[in-house]
Image: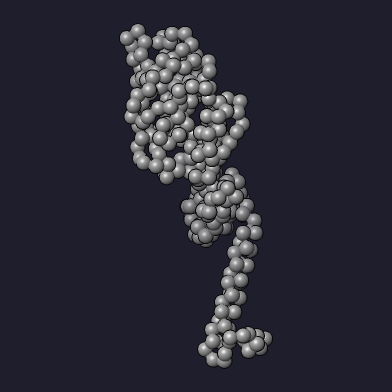
Amino acid sequence: MVGAAILESPGEGIGSNSILSQKRQLSSSDAAKRDAKKRSTMLMDLEILDCPICYEAFTIPSSRCDNGHLACSSCCPKLNNKCPACTSPVGHNRCRAMESVLESILIPCPNAKLGCKKNVSYGKELTHEKECMFSHCACPALDCNYTSSYKDLYTHYRITHMEINQINTFICDIPLSVRMNISKKILIRTEHLTNHLFAVQCFREPYGVYVTVSCIAPSSPELSQYSYALSYTVDGHTVIYKSPEVKRVLKLSFETPLENFMLIPNSLLRGDVLEMRISVKKLNKE
């Protein structure tokens, strides 16, 4: 019993101290109940928060038909705003109850075991992972499967892939001349102060060569952001491209880009070598 426990505890008297002890025990009990509720929430089957049509996580706003069947806002137009379960109109009425649930469900970041302590809304894990400082980045070297945090990636690349006495660093705001073989597809350079790895990639297509620049790092607002400019000159002709943003990626894509690139037409190519000028500008401080 609580009273007996109080009387037998050393240093505890009858009166205000015993009342405080009872309150502390009740508070501990309440905290245990709250923790149990939290654990039960974590054990909930989160698939019930997925759209039954596209199987993606519901987003706000979410919709319901007159009979209560749910559909995400993206699926309603594809269904001509007709519920697939009962053919009632759907997409005109928001399901406030589901939206309240979505706002209340937080799950640990996928990188929790790596040190991230943030909780994210269900369905937004991938968005957060691209920005998470603990996300692993893939080595940009061809045929290398190494992954690590962006901070450790430079050390791996320098030790494993850089040749002795190879100069591959640059300083922001100072134009850099590069010479790369189109057939090698990729050229890596590192920013002198931050050690961020930058990849210059080229993609040969029937009508010319695409050239783009990426930074191997999470898109976290806590890290430096960059813009870049490319220029290519041959026989008095110059192609210039300026981008307001260097795309930050966790892993390089080797598919021809659809945006953010410079196109050098075949008429201006001279063999398999590209000689270009690259200027990278830091937009914010890390």
What quarter of the picture does the N terminus occupy? Answer: bottom right
22 lies above or below 154: below
Q: Position of residue 186 (x, y in %)?
A: 50, 22
Q: Closest to the observer: 115 or 95? A: 115
Height in image: 198 above or below 95?
above
Identify the image quadrant of the C terminus: top left
Residue at image point 58% right, 69% down: 34
Residue nearer the viewer, 279 or 15: 15
Q: Residue at x 56, y 79 (%)?
A: 24
The one of 53 and 5 positioned closer to us in this rendering: 5
In this figure, which colouring scheme has been used for the structure?
Answer: one colour
Work out whether residue 151 can be spotted: yes
Task: Find residue 259 and report its image quarter.
Answer: top left
- Total numbered labels placed on residues in the image: 0
Q: State the image quarter where residue 23 is shown.
A: bottom right
Residue 200 visible at all: no
> Residue 40, percent across and down?
63, 63
Q: Is residue 158 above or below residue 107?
A: above
Residue placed at 50% from the left, 45% from the top?
132
Direction front: furthest residue = 165
Query: Which residue sits at x=35%, y=13%?
Result: 233
In the depicted view, which residue is nearer to us: 148 or 264?
Answer: 148
Q: Position of residue 59 (x, y in %)?
A: 51, 50
Q: Position of residue 243 (x, y in %)?
A: 37, 29
